[in-house]
Image (spheres, helix red, strand yellow):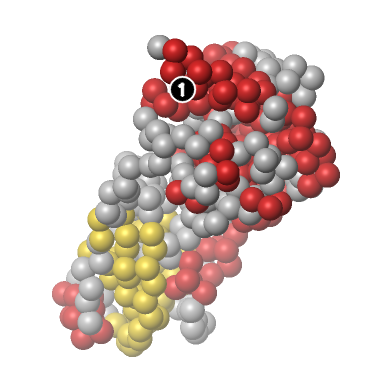
Amino acid sequence: ISVHRFQSHWMSEILNQIPGPLLQWYDSRARVLPWRSQPTPYRVWVSEIMLQQTRVEAALPYFDRFMAALPDIAALAQAPEAQLLKLWEGLGYYSRVRNLQKAARQVMEQWGGMLPQKLEDLIALPGIGEYSAGAIASIAYGQRVPAVDGNVLRVVSRLLASRENVMDPKVKRQLRQQVWDIIPAQRPGDFNQSLMELGALVCLPNGKPLCSDCPLENLCLGNRLAIAQELPVKPPKKARRVVPRTVFVLCSQGRLLLHRRPSRGLLASLWEFPGQDGHLSLEQAAETLAQAGIQVSSIASLGEHTHIFSHVEWPMVCYQVECLPFPAAEDYVWCTPQQLQEQYALPSAFRPFAQRLHLTP
């Protein structure tokens, strides 16, 4: 027990020294971001959902476009699904934006169009977990609550030279509580963002941390013991399932055929170029189309592309097919290239093929 108490004591001693130098560093080094310049609850919320599986640099143009089209919760709640998905096109993980709208409608009904301030009320909304709720409550509402994401887990693990598995719920809860204990009352939102920013810019993942640039270099046990790069400890990732696919870009009279995916599962209800599992050669592809009753005028390869989802990998081959027109069946639609660009959300898995198209009117 005495050893445990001693360890807890020196861990607290290290963590208690963090806020001052970290906030000073943040004031001089933080990136200028639109949701920081105007940290309204709605803007903070949308930015946090966008950033869950997206780098800041990639999210910036999406955030600006989203805010211009849907400037408040009421607009988000009322947006047609096609517009919503088009605004999110290329960000992936479309369940995030669907949950955004579900939550917006709930906020309109239950909270008069204003995001609630309490952590538990935020967590009760679709798509808002413990981390996002903490970010909104601290950044937008100035509440002294933690926002512990992967960046923060990495920073704190390295500071304490912790070799415990950060994916273990018990360990994660403990680290979250340790962060909570040291949040300053005056600047909780800035403090949470400073920890995230340190992890994003200095205490880097998947590589050597930039310890000489870190304001906490002298406090960090991971740095002192030269083990920072080994931390945090995580279990090995499961191998992704590999599903080879053949994609057909069917073209007729200057129009393209799109297929709406099933309402459940991967890329649910999104539009795609038709296709099937397995790799087909050009000859096999032509034969498959002929068997489906499609009268092919010409067929040419659009090359290969591999798209990686979190749990599955699609190595794809693609063929552009000129064919005689035929009626679009249920869940299919013929569209012009302009309609594809303006109306239909095409997942990023298929965008490289769309960019390689050679269309004839």
Image: 51 above or below 165: below
The quarter of the image holding the N terminus is: top left
Q: Please give the name of the residue rendered at 52% of the width and 49% of the height, measured from the top-left corner.
A: 226
Expressed as whole percent of the image width and height from the top left, the position of residue 246 reads 28, 70
Q: Is residue 62 visible?
A: no
In the figure, residue 320 lies in which quadrant?
A: bottom left
Tell me which amino acid carries mark 1: Arg
Q: Please give the name of the residue rendered at 44% of the width and 13% of the height, measured from the top-left corner.
A: 2
In the figure, residue 177 lies in which quadrant?
A: top right
Q: Please give the name of the residue rendered at 77% of the width and 24% of the height, measured from the top-left corner.
A: 187
Return the residue at label 1: 173
Expressed as whole percent of the image width and height from the top left, the position of residue 270 reads 42, 51
Expressed as whole percent of the image width and height from the top left, the position of residue 175 reads 51, 26
**Is 177 on the left-hand or right-hand side of 280?**
right
Image: 28 above or below 2: below
Expressed as whole percent of the image width and height from the top left, the position of residue 348 reads 48, 60
Looking at the image, which is closer to me, 200 or 295?
200
User: In what element is the residue under mark 1?
Assistant: helix
**Is 355 on the left-hand or right-hand side of 235?**
right
Q: Please give the name of the residue rendered at 63% of the width and 23% of the height, measured from the top-left corner.
A: 13
Tell me if mark 1 has few (under 14), some (14-19) or many (20+) residues whose alpha carbon lies within 10 angstroms of its own.
some
- How many labels were placed on the picture? 1
Q: Is residue 170 visible?
A: yes
Looking at the image, which is closer to me, 18 or 308?
18
In the figure, residue 152 lies in which quadrant?
A: top right
Looking at the image, which is closer to me, 231 or 217?
217
Image: 215 above or below 62: above
